[in-house]
Amino acid sequence: MELVRHAVLKRPCPKGRVGSNPTSGIAASLDGMCGRYTLANPDPKRLRLRFGLDAAAEIDEEPRFNIAPTDPVLAVRERSEGRELGRLRWGLLPGKWATERGQRPLINARAETVATQAAFAESFRERRCLVPADGFYEWRRDDRGKVPLWFHRPDDELFAFAGVWAQYTPRGGEPIMSCAIVTCPPNELMRPIHDRMPVILGPDVEALWLDPEAEPADLEDLLVPAPEGVLAVREVGDLVSNVREDGPELIVPRAEATLF
């Protein structure tokens, strides 16, 4: 899944997913968000303009409404010749972690420890990326059980999660390029729902996050909750709870929605 600047990016088939609970087995201390997000409008021109990509980069990505751990996901990283867009497997497989500890892929990295925790520290220093999205899901518990919510920008524009990536080559196998999304404490909108949220970088600081010469302290300062007003939330139906579902009906507002 190597990132390539001028390759045609075609959407992977979702039927390769296994199981109905892709986050099972991930250590609770590292499980910061529920693990589903959307890229519902991946218009190539929109992606190029938003993330400063080469106009010659060809992108053929279908809308995705239920991106889950182990899926190949779009990611932007900085190279000597400029920014490039490609795919990484969601679920970090850093070599030492994968070979010596036999752990499952890590979908999240905590902002408080990403610079020091063995599984993430090298990627934080040397391999950071942007993960384009336009929404993510979380589940609220109430008297109806677990109710899915979709968090998105009020204008439905693209945004970027802060990501870190790694390359791992299993013995006798092909290199696996993988990533994790950084999470932080919640803002006021998220606080009643979950004690973590993904780090959403503002467009004005994305270049700093990608800068290979950036100081670690400056990078850590970016790993904060999204300001109030950046995100809106809507209650949606239960289809998203099935990892095999993937269509626009997943983000249709629930008819009887009553938030908080």
Image (spheres, rainbow, N blue to C red):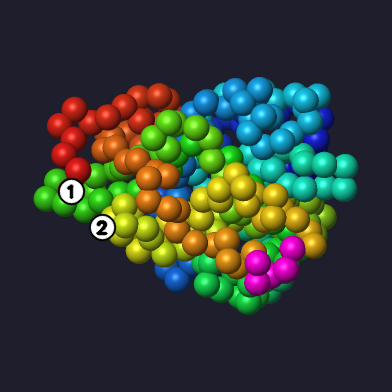
Helix, strand or loop status at disc 1 = loop
Image location (x, y in percent) of residue 135: 44, 39
Q: CA distance from mark 2 to mark 1?
A: 8 Å
Residue 27 included in the magenta stretch of the image: no
Q: Which one is in front, 102 or 27? A: 27
Give the structural element (helix, strand or loop) at label 2: loop
- Amino acid at dot 1: Phe
Q: Residue at x 35, y 25 (%)?
A: 249
Front-most of residues 64 and 202: 202
Q: Crowdedness of circle 2 by 10 Å Cα count: few (<14), some, many (20+)?
A: few
Badge 2 is on which residue?
Answer: 192
| Mark 2 or mark 1: whose residue is earlier in sequence | 2
In the rendering, at what x and y percent does residue 137 appear?
Answer: 38, 44
| Callout 2 touching callout 1 (CB < 8 Å) | yes
The image quarter containing residue 217 is: bottom right
**Magenta span covers which residues?**
214-218
Would residue 216 be counted in the magenta stretch? Answer: yes
Q: Is residue 194 above or below residue 132?
A: below
Is residue 69 in view from this perspective?
A: yes
